[in-house]
Amino acid sequence: EAVQRERRKAREEMIRVRQGIQKVLERERKLMREQVRRATGQVREWVVKQQQDQLLQQAGQLQEEAQKLQGLAMSRAGGRGGRESANSSGAGSSRRGVRSTSRDEYADRYEGDESEY
């Protein structure tokens, strides 16, 4: 009978220890999940910022290129007796100074003229 009492006490103690360990593990898991959530959010913010910076840089480069090409087109149009300026002064034209041409027309017109770029 004394042995059984000791066994029961030992079992009850083991159950309390297991429950304590489970509580500690659950708390640790919650903390780890929260840390992972925070880190993931920070990484997402960083990635978005990097992408925005890259897009802004590309937009700036494209704008510079467009300005160079527009200046080139205007200088070439000025050398042809103002043919381009007559086309660009039309009412309601949203693309002032830019005339649409096919790639073949462009290649034929400016072939061998890469030195200006």
Image (cartoon, grey):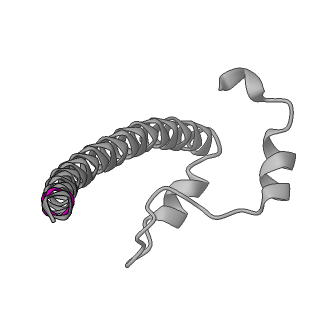
Query: Which x, y percent locates residue 64?
Result: 44, 35
Q: Is residue 42 magenta?
A: no
Quadrant of the image for the N terminus? Answer: bottom left
Q: Residue at x 52, y 37 (%)?
A: 65
Asked which quadrant contains residue 117, the reply is top right
Position in image of residue 40 (x %, y %): 31, 49
**Vertical position of residue 8 compared to residue 63: above or below:** below
- Please provide the residue range marked out in magenta: 5-9
In-image side of 92 versus 58 (left or right): left
| Residue 77 image position (x, y, % from top left) | 59, 45
> How many numbered circles does the render carry?
0
Question: Measured from the top left, where is residue 29 in percent x and y?
Answer: 25, 53
- Given residues 99 and 22, the one toward you in this image is 22
Does the magenta stretch mainly form a helix, a strand or a loop?
A: helix
Horizontal side, residue 22 vs residue 58: left or right: left
Classify 92 as above or below 60.
Answer: below
Taking depth in this image into account, of 81 and 53 the one nearest to the observer is 53
